[in-house]
Image (cartoon, helix red, strand yellow):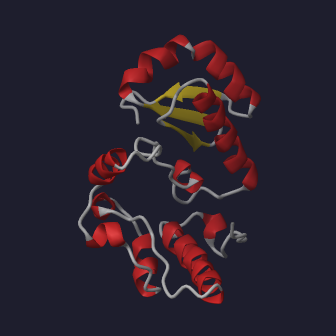
Amino acid sequence: LVELDMPEGIEANPPERCYICKRALYAKLLEVAREAGFPHVLDGSNLDDLADFRPGLRALRELEVQSPLLDCKLSKADVRRLSEALGLSTWNKPTNACLLTRLPIGKRVSMEVLQRVEEAERFLKARGYAWVRVRTHGELARIEVAPEQRSQLLQDAEAVTETLEGFGFRHVTLDLLGY
C-alpha cells in the first residue's frame, strides 16, 4: 500500500482531476518501484479506455508507465474472457472507478462527501447489488444499478432510502438507464 495525500488542486474537482491524481499517484509508485529495484510500472488500461474521457492516460504517457493490455489491443471483454479461462476469481469483478467520478465536475471535494458515497455503495453491495454507483448531486443520491436489478432496487426502496438518508442524503433516486 502506498499512502498519498490528496494532490493539490483535486479539491476543486476540475475536469483534469484524473490527470492530476494519476500524475501524483504514478510518480509515487515509480519512486517506490525504483527504490525496490523494479525498472517499470505497469497499469491495467485497456482498449475500451480509449473510447472514454480519460485525462489520466496523459499522465501515464508522460511518466512512461507501461500499459501492456492496451499495447496488446485487449478490450475489457477480452481481459474478462482470458481471466476466466485462466481460472482467476476476479474475472467478473465489477469495475471500481475512483469515488471522485461520483461527483459532478466542479463540485468541491470533501472527505465527508466521499465517505457518504462510499458508505452508500458499501451498503448496496452488501444487499447484493454488485454493479452499483451512487452519484451525488448535493443532498441527492442518484443510484445506478445493472438493468436487471432495477426492479429489485424499487422493491428495496424504503430500506435503501431510509439508510441513505441516515448517511446524510435528503433525496434518493434511481437512474432509469442504470449502470
- Of 2 and 148, nearer the camera is 2
In the displayed orientation, state which residue is furthest to the left: 73
37 left or right of 39? right
- Of 88 and 46, nearer the camera is 88
Q: Is residue 43 above or below residue 177?
A: below
Residue displayed at 40% across by 78% down = 66
Residue 77: percent from the left, percent from the top? Answer: 28, 48
Residue displayed at 63% across by 13% down = 158
Residue 29: percent from the left, percent from the top? Answer: 60, 78
Rendering quarter of residue 119: top right
- Of 29 and 40, nearer the camera is 40
The quadrant of the image that shows the C terminus is top left
Rendering quarter of residue 169: top right
26 left or right of 69? right
Residue displayed at 66% across by 65% down = 11
The quadrant of the image that shows the N terminus is bottom right
